[in-house]
Amino acid sequence: MEIKANKISKMRKDAIEIFYKALKTVQADTAIRRHCKFDGERLLVGHRAYHLERYKNLFVVGSGKATASMASALEDLIGDKITDGIITVKYDHVADLNHINLIEAGHPLPDENGQYGAVGILNLLKKAEKDDLVLCLISGGGSALMPLPYNGLTLKDKRDTIRILLSCGATIHEINSIRKHTSKIKGGRLACAAYPATIVTLILSDVVGDDLDVIASGPTIPDLSSFHDCMKIFKRYDIIHKIPKNILNHIESGISGRIPETPKPADPAFERTHNLVIGSNIESLMAAKEKAESLGYNVLLLSSMIEGETRYVAQIHGAIAREIIKSGNPLSPPVCILSGGETTVTVAGKGLGGRNQEFALSAAIDISGKENIVILSGGTDGTDGPTDAAGAISDTLTLKRAKERELDPYHFLSNNDAYHFFQKLDDLFVTGPTNTNVMDLRIVLVT
């Protein structure tokens, strides 16, 4: 048993190395420097060039967990050219900035600081004219960190609605459809506020498939969803009776045409708007693959687009690991199974945790007693649910250790309390703020 424990310990170290290699590749400042260059006259963004002397003002705005790091890299590049700027970030996700105002705010539930920052951003962009350039920095968490309720709605209305949607298992696409239709800034309305200025948005994607209209609720992207879609979401999860009355009345007013729809692709503002994804989940997975191979693992990269109920997704990963041990299919050990994306948790209990911790716990139950398997599931932003952990690590000995401490994994799972389960085993995966956010990484090692 001691030999097996030593093997597991080595695999755990490998999993952590693989995770941090993936994380390093999608650091926000690294992504900015990879996609943006300045030659003294032109700002090169992707394949486009912007001659800065042709613009009267250069404004920088943005929102998200990684935005401070993005802004810092941008200041290093063109700091003296920036006229003014405002960004909103999650508390403690900060950087020292000289030309851009930074406001810390609440996430995942929006707070008054976020609303204060959103008002400042909107007011700044209303000053923008045709000969101005706006650089917009967007990363995961931008929806919650830039809240500006539509007329007649309150921040509490939006906060209560998001809490209900998060608890019922709604996807990020569905949640952001609601956000866009209850906001004065999301769903393309930020681009409309900046019009007729030119706006360039640099995006770190935290959304499955990198759907631009969903990342941070697409503040500079035409919205393809509708008020009708919002009502369908409420009905799909049978939560109409839980949604605040102001929100329901607002959605119904939109359906009847009393409130205008979000801006669509034909809006002239989007003719002067350019969007570029500078970091995504697949990039992190490819870096993880390279690291795993260097450690001697055969790599099975499943997908960067995995969604669904967390515990079911965990069981599938566990089943693949067990198949590898039993038959050597689809690869012979040692194997590293990689996947990314963002799963959901339907909350039925009153515990504490997040989708990554619940994944690790559910998978631990599925692989218990088998040969050497280690599972690390973590959020690249360093935060898993409303906790201080990025995720958790489990293995084929996890349930044995839990039994020795009289911990019932099934009880913790049914109560959605993976955090306290792993805390008692000292198996929480804590990174602190990472200054990036490209969804989750799941690493399953089999030897």
Image (cartoon, helix red, strand yellow):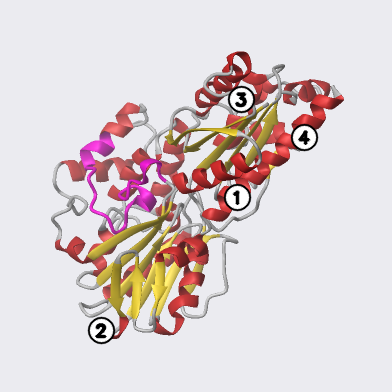
Residue 220 sits inside the magenta stretch:
yes
Q: Earlier in the sequence, mark 1 or mark 4?
A: 4
Which residue extends farthest top? Answer: 326
Q: Which mark is residue 363?
A: 3
Q: CA distance from mark 1 to mark 3?
A: 23 Å
Say if mark 4 contacts mark 3, CB within 8 Å. Answer: no
The residue at which mark 1 appears reads as 21
Give x and y (percent) for residue 391. 62, 40
Q: Could you tell me which residue is drawn at 37 percent across and 50 percent down?
A: 215
From the image, which quarter does the N terminus lie in?
top right
The residue at which mark 4 appears reads as 9
Given the image, on which type of amino acid does mark 3 rest?
A: Ala
Closest to the observer, 268 or 261: 268
Given the image, on which type of amino acid does mark 4 rest?
A: Ser
Q: Quadrant of residue 294?
A: top right
Say if mark 1 contacts mark 2, CB within 8 Å. Answer: no
Given the image, on which type of amino acid does mark 1 rest?
A: Lys
Q: CA distance from mark 2 to mark 4?
A: 58 Å
Q: Earlier in the sequence, mark 1 or mark 3?
A: 1
> Residue 403 vs residue 441: left or right?
right
The residue at which mark 2 appears reads as 54
